[in-house]
Image (spheres, rainbow, N blue to C red):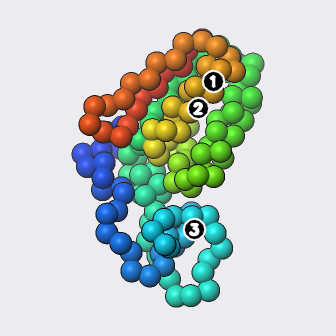
Amino acid sequence: MKNNLYPTNERSYLSSKKHKGIAVCPECHLVFQNGKWAKTKLPDKEYYYHMCPACKRIKDGYFGGILNIKTNLLETKKEEIMNLIKNKESQAQVSNPLRRVGKIEEINKDEMVVYTTFEHLATSIGKALKSAYKGNLEIQYRENEKSARIYWTK
């Protein structure tokens, strides 16, 4: 699985074509209708399967945001930090269910990396970590692309 932050064609994950009819993601079961993906019950009408942009990014390993967390707090407050990450993801999904944590890698006892489908979620988690635990936050946006690399250290 590739782990590229900046896909060659970022826009390939946001379809510009209109879906004909109703689409359901075979992975996460989001439903595409009326021009957007939403968490809703499966439609009673006829639908077809089409992978949503978030699942496609996760499958391809192309993430919109990468958050590096480096702190000795992971030894004592890892569960709190994981809950903060999950809460920010849940909040983000209220307005856009495509904003997800794609994966979390534990590098060692003091470092982890959080990969998100879009840059907004990684940035939001980084800001929440700084607010809750202080420390240093660095946000780097890639020029002309919708992607970010965030570093939070304490």
Give the percent coordinates (x, y) of residue 82: 68, 33
Q: Which residue is mark 2?
A: 125
The reply to whether discs 2 and 3 touch (Cβ–Cβ < 8 Å) is no
Q: Amino acid at mark 2?
A: Ile
Give the percent coordinates (x, y) of residue 32: 50, 70
Q: Earlier in the sequence, mark 1 or mark 3?
A: 3
Seen in the image, is 96 located left or right of residue 87? left
Q: Which quarter of the rendered picture does the C terminus lie within?
A: top right
Residue 106 or residue 24, whichever sits in front: 24
Question: Is residue 71 positioned above or below 146 on the image?
Answer: above
Q: Amino acid at mark 3?
A: His
Callout 2 crowding tier (Cα within 10 Å): few <14, some 14–19, many ≥20? many
Q: Which residue is mark 3?
A: 29
Give the percent coordinates (x, y) of residue 116: 49, 41
Labelled disc at residue 19: none
**Residue at the front extreme, as displayed:** 34
Seen in the image, is 60 located left or right of residue 96? left
Seen in the image, is 123 located left or right of residue 80? left
Question: Is residue 4 positioned above or below 68 on the image?
Answer: below
Q: CA distance from mark 2 to mark 3?
A: 25 Å
Q: Quadrant of residue 70?
A: top right
Labelled disc at residue 129: 1
Residue at 61 percent across and 64 percent down: it is 39
In this rendering, which labeled residue sits more in front, label 1 or label 3? 1
Q: Quadrant of residue 86?
A: top right
Q: Amino acid at mark 1?
A: Leu
Residue at 62 percent across and 86 percent down: it is 44
Q: Secondary structure at mark 3?
A: loop
The reply to whether discs 1 and 2 touch (Cβ–Cβ < 8 Å) is yes
